[in-house]
Image: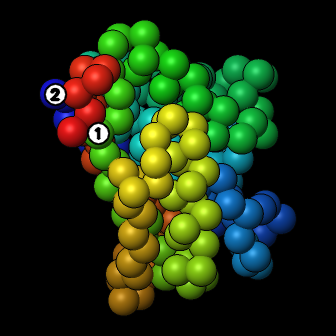
Amino acid sequence: MRIGHGFDAHRLVAGRELVLGGVTIPHELGLLGHSDADVLVHAICDALLGALGAGDIGRHFPDTHPAYRGISSLKLLREVMTLVRTRGYAVTNIDATIIAQKPRLSPFIEAMRENIAQQCATESARINVKATTTETLGFEGRCEGISSHAVVLLARHGKSG
Ligand code: MG
Protein backbone atom coordinates (compact mmCIF):
# COMPACT_ATOMS: atom_id res chain seq x y z
CA MET A 1 0.00 0.00 0.00
CA ARG A 2 1.11 3.56 -0.64
CA ILE A 3 -0.16 6.77 0.98
CA GLY A 4 0.05 10.25 -0.55
CA HIS A 5 -0.78 13.81 0.46
CA GLY A 6 -1.52 16.82 -1.73
CA PHE A 7 -2.10 20.49 -1.06
CA ASP A 8 -2.95 23.33 -3.43
CA ALA A 9 -4.21 26.91 -3.30
CA HIS A 10 -5.38 29.32 -5.99
CA ARG A 11 -6.28 32.99 -5.95
CA LEU A 12 -9.93 34.08 -6.41
CA VAL A 13 -10.44 36.72 -9.10
CA ALA A 14 -13.26 38.26 -11.09
CA GLY A 15 -13.87 37.07 -14.65
CA ARG A 16 -13.04 33.39 -14.11
CA GLU A 17 -15.31 30.40 -13.65
CA LEU A 18 -15.18 28.60 -10.31
CA VAL A 19 -14.50 24.92 -11.04
CA LEU A 20 -14.11 22.48 -8.14
CA GLY A 21 -14.03 18.73 -8.63
CA GLY A 22 -14.95 19.30 -12.27
CA VAL A 23 -18.18 21.07 -11.26
CA THR A 24 -18.76 24.66 -12.39
CA ILE A 25 -20.17 26.46 -9.37
CA PRO A 26 -22.14 29.71 -9.66
CA HIS A 27 -20.10 32.44 -7.92
CA GLU A 28 -19.01 36.01 -8.62
CA LEU A 29 -15.33 34.98 -8.43
CA GLY A 30 -13.33 32.12 -9.95
CA LEU A 31 -9.90 30.62 -9.40
CA LEU A 32 -6.93 31.98 -11.33
CA GLY A 33 -4.57 29.54 -13.00
CA HIS A 34 -3.08 28.24 -16.23
CA SER A 35 -5.57 25.33 -16.37
CA ASP A 36 -9.13 25.63 -15.06
CA ALA A 37 -7.43 26.05 -11.63
CA ASP A 38 -9.47 23.24 -10.08
CA VAL A 39 -7.73 23.34 -6.72
CA LEU A 40 -9.45 20.17 -5.43
CA VAL A 41 -8.41 18.05 -8.41
CA HIS A 42 -4.87 19.49 -8.28
CA ALA A 43 -4.54 18.44 -4.62
CA ILE A 44 -5.79 14.95 -5.53
CA CYS A 45 -3.33 14.70 -8.47
CA ASP A 46 -0.48 15.69 -6.15
CA ALA A 47 -1.60 13.13 -3.55
CA LEU A 48 -1.67 10.38 -6.21
CA LEU A 49 1.76 11.38 -7.54
CA GLY A 50 3.02 11.57 -3.98
CA ALA A 51 1.81 8.04 -3.26
CA LEU A 52 3.71 6.82 -6.33
CA GLY A 53 6.83 8.76 -5.36
CA ALA A 54 6.50 10.41 -8.77
CA GLY A 55 7.03 14.08 -7.96
CA ASP A 56 4.26 16.61 -8.36
CA ILE A 57 1.72 18.04 -10.78
CA GLY A 58 4.00 20.92 -11.80
CA ARG A 59 6.63 18.48 -13.01
CA HIS A 60 4.16 16.40 -15.05
CA PHE A 61 2.06 19.29 -16.40
CA PRO A 62 4.21 22.47 -16.52
CA ASP A 63 2.08 25.63 -16.24
CA THR A 64 4.18 27.19 -18.99
CA HIS A 65 3.05 24.53 -21.49
CA PRO A 66 0.40 25.74 -23.98
CA ALA A 67 -1.21 22.26 -24.08
CA TYR A 68 -2.43 22.73 -20.51
CA ARG A 69 -3.79 26.26 -20.93
CA GLY A 70 -7.45 26.30 -19.84
CA ILE A 71 -7.51 22.49 -19.73
CA SER A 72 -10.04 20.69 -17.54
CA SER A 73 -8.10 19.38 -14.58
CA LEU A 74 -10.16 16.19 -14.79
CA LYS A 75 -8.05 15.42 -17.89
CA LEU A 76 -4.90 15.86 -15.83
CA LEU A 77 -6.38 13.51 -13.22
CA ARG A 78 -7.10 10.97 -15.95
CA GLU A 79 -3.44 11.12 -17.06
CA VAL A 80 -2.22 10.77 -13.49
CA MET A 81 -4.49 7.73 -13.06
CA THR A 82 -2.96 6.20 -16.19
CA LEU A 83 0.40 6.46 -14.43
CA VAL A 84 -1.10 4.95 -11.25
CA ARG A 85 -2.38 1.95 -13.24
CA THR A 86 0.88 1.61 -15.20
CA ARG A 87 2.72 1.33 -11.89
CA GLY A 88 0.31 -1.47 -10.88
CA TYR A 89 -1.82 0.41 -8.36
CA ALA A 90 -5.51 1.22 -7.88
CA VAL A 91 -7.20 3.75 -5.60
CA THR A 92 -8.35 2.31 -2.28
CA ASN A 93 -9.78 5.62 -1.14
CA ILE A 94 -9.34 9.37 -1.36
CA ASP A 95 -10.25 11.88 1.34
CA ALA A 96 -10.11 15.57 0.45
CA THR A 97 -11.02 18.88 2.06
CA ILE A 98 -11.79 22.16 0.31
CA ILE A 99 -11.18 25.29 2.39
CA ALA A 100 -13.40 28.13 1.20
CA GLN A 101 -15.31 30.84 3.01
CA LYS A 102 -17.75 31.18 0.11
CA PRO A 103 -19.78 29.93 -1.70
CA ARG A 104 -21.65 27.16 0.09
CA LEU A 105 -20.36 23.96 -1.51
CA SER A 106 -22.52 21.22 0.01
CA PRO A 107 -25.01 21.14 -2.92
CA PHE A 108 -22.13 20.28 -5.29
CA ILE A 109 -20.18 17.71 -3.26
CA GLU A 110 -21.92 14.62 -4.69
CA ALA A 111 -21.28 15.72 -8.27
CA MET A 112 -17.59 16.33 -7.42
CA ARG A 113 -17.29 12.83 -5.91
CA GLU A 114 -18.83 11.28 -9.00
CA ASN A 115 -16.53 13.19 -11.37
CA ILE A 116 -13.44 12.17 -9.41
CA ALA A 117 -14.58 8.55 -9.04
CA GLN A 118 -15.16 8.33 -12.79
CA GLN A 119 -11.61 9.49 -13.57
CA CYS A 120 -10.21 7.12 -10.95
CA ALA A 121 -12.24 4.18 -12.36
CA THR A 122 -13.74 3.52 -8.95
CA GLU A 123 -17.03 4.03 -7.13
CA SER A 124 -17.89 7.34 -5.47
CA ALA A 125 -18.11 5.54 -2.09
CA ARG A 126 -14.29 5.48 -2.16
CA ILE A 127 -14.05 9.25 -2.75
CA ASN A 128 -14.81 11.60 0.13
CA VAL A 129 -14.92 15.37 -0.35
CA LYS A 130 -15.43 17.76 2.54
CA ALA A 131 -15.75 21.53 2.60
CA THR A 132 -14.96 23.84 5.47
CA THR A 133 -14.65 27.56 6.10
CA THR A 134 -11.94 29.08 8.29
CA GLU A 135 -14.44 31.28 10.15
CA THR A 136 -13.08 34.25 8.16
CA LEU A 137 -9.44 33.61 9.20
CA GLY A 138 -6.59 33.73 6.68
CA PHE A 139 -6.65 34.12 2.88
CA GLU A 140 -9.48 31.64 2.44
CA GLY A 141 -11.49 33.44 5.12
CA ARG A 142 -10.94 36.80 3.41
CA CYS A 143 -12.20 35.22 0.14
CA GLU A 144 -8.81 35.91 -1.51
CA GLY A 145 -8.39 32.27 -2.47
CA ILE A 146 -9.45 28.67 -2.01
CA SER A 147 -7.20 25.83 -0.89
CA SER A 148 -7.54 22.08 -0.74
CA HIS A 149 -5.87 19.13 0.94
CA ALA A 150 -6.13 15.50 -0.18
CA VAL A 151 -4.85 12.18 1.06
CA VAL A 152 -4.99 8.99 -0.97
CA LEU A 153 -4.34 5.34 -0.33
CA LEU A 154 -3.26 3.12 -3.21
CA ALA A 155 -3.13 -0.67 -3.25
CA ARG A 156 -1.78 -3.16 -5.75
CA HIS A 157 -4.31 -4.07 -8.44
CA GLY A 158 -6.83 -6.60 -7.13
CA LYS A 159 -6.10 -5.72 -3.51
CA SER A 160 -7.95 -2.39 -3.27
CA GLY A 161 -9.48 -3.14 0.18
MG1 MG B 1 -2.97 24.19 -8.78
Q: Which label's residue is closer to the chain start, 1 or 2?
A: 2
Which residue is denoted by mark 2 in the rendering? 1
Name the residue at 50% across, 25% down.
80
For this view, does 40 lie left or right of residue 97?
right
For this view, does 34 lie left or right of residue 125?
right
Tell me the CA gap for discs 1 and 2. 9 Å
Name the residue at 43% across, 10% down.
86
Which residue is denoted by mark 1 in the rendering? 92
Badge 1 crowding class, 10 Å Cα cut-off, few under 14, some 14 to 19, many 20 or more, is: many
Q: Amino acid at mark 1?
A: Thr
Q: Secondary structure at mark 1?
A: strand
Q: Position of residue 61 (x, y in %)?
A: 58, 23
Q: How many marks?
A: 2
- Circles 1, 2 touching at the beta carbon (< 8 Å): yes
- Rendering quarter of residue 1: top left
Q: Secondary structure at mark 2?
A: loop
Up the image or down, 108 lies above or below 156; here it is below
Q: Position of residue 62 (x, y in %)?
A: 59, 23
Residue 81 appears in the rendering: yes
Q: Position of residue 11 (x, y in %)?
A: 58, 60
The residue closer to the viewer here, 70 or 83, is 83
Residue at the bottom extreme, as displayed: 135
Badge 2 crowding class, 10 Å Cα cut-off, few under 14, some 14 to 19, many 20 or more, is: some
The residue closer to the viewer here, 115 or 122, is 122
Up the image or down, 160 lies above or below 62; here it is below
For this view, does 136 lie left or right of residue 36?
left
- Identify the disc placed on residue 56: none
- Rendering quarter of residue 14: bottom right
Name the residue at 78% across, 39% down.
70
Q: Position of residue 48 (x, y in %)?
A: 36, 32
The residue closer to the viewer here, 18 or 84, is 84
The residue closer to the viewer here, 8 or 26, is 26
